[in-house]
Amino acid sequence: MKLVTYRTGVEAAARLGVISEDLVLDVADLGAAFGEAMPDTMLGLIDSGRAGLAALSALLARAGSVPPIGTATALTNVTLLAPIPRPRKNVFGIGLNYLDHVAESAAALDTDAALPKQPVIFSKPPTSVIGPDGPIHHNKKITQQLDWEVELGVIIGSTARRVAREAALAHVFGYTVLIDISARDCRRAGQWIYSKGQDTFCPMGPCIVTADEIPDPQVLDLWLTLNGEEKQRSNTSHMLFKVDELIADISQGITLEPGDIIASGTPAGVGAGRSPQEWMWPGDRLVACVEGIGTLRHAIIDATPE
């Protein structure tokens, strides 16, 4: 299933939906049409566990190709939000997780040239999250080095505490596209959260694809363009630490809970790694895609306070 959080108008409340061809079916309304109570938020559905997904799958089968009146809206007539508009906790970011990105970072950002022996973990606060088409803010008083990173986002579906790698993927609810925006000149004494955690620095969406549709997250192409020029192209097979390793590693000391998000790292091709270095500026257009999930499109806007 492709699950979305959406609204039908500027003032309308956010709703939980599932994409069916060119329609968005409202999950709560679909349940009501068949006399069943269903969650109306993504976090509510995640909290309902496997039983909730099974119930939704059964409702979709009952609805068939002609959903009940009042339960569907054309995809072109809705505004998609971040699938989880307000995460409960910080997003877990993973740094230096593609072999070629380790090399370019060592050359451009003074990070260690040796391959990490354990995942490099940072975080992005909930306030950094924006949805599809949301503007990415450029504040020239803070940064002159705004950079891009396309990533596979991993959504946790059940509590993971000290899990073994072999059992890790069973805790995944689904996957999304995520862009890790970075202000490279805002790193402070080696700490990354201010560089990567500013408002609008975590575009996410356009949907969550449930884990059953992506049984192997290590075979997905991902790419990014800036102003129509390709900057990044790789495959998740090139991750240094695979998704199951990341879940197992984090969960040894930090309990992963339903709705938690892992940004699994980016391949080479970031602006800092280019010669000469390249940065994003107001008026630029950023497009990022992960195979089988979808595409994010964002404009960079001037958000410098007067």
Image (tube, helix red, strand yellow):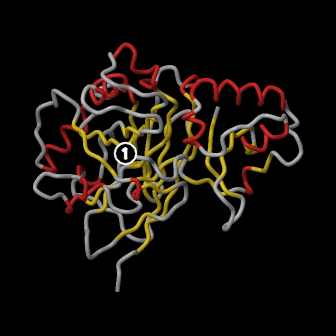
Identity, as a three-letter code, of the amino acid under mark 1: Val
Q: Is residue 156 left or right of residue 6?
A: left
Residue sitting at x 41%, y 71%: 282
- Where residue 268 appears, x then y in whole percent? 29, 41
Q: Is residue 93 left or right of residue 60?
A: left
- Where residue 219 appears, x then y in whole percent? 45, 24
Residue sitting at x 25%, y 59%: 194
Residue sitting at x 67%, y 67%: 11
Comparing 42 with 272, the one in front is 42
Q: Is residue 92 left or right of residue 229?
A: left
Q: Quadrant of the C terminus?
A: bottom left
On the image, which quarter does residue 8 sit in? bottom right
On the image, which quarter does residue 199 sit in? bottom left
Q: Callout 1: helix, strand or loop?
A: strand
Residue sitting at x 11%, y 48%: 110
Query: Mark 1 packing: few (<14 Cα in 10 Å), some, or many (20+)?
Result: many
* Label 1 sits on residue: 91
- Where residue 290 appears, x then y in whole percent? 49, 38
Q: Is residue 206 left or right of residue 65?
A: left
Q: Quadrant of the N terminus?
A: top right
Residue positioned most to the bottom: 306
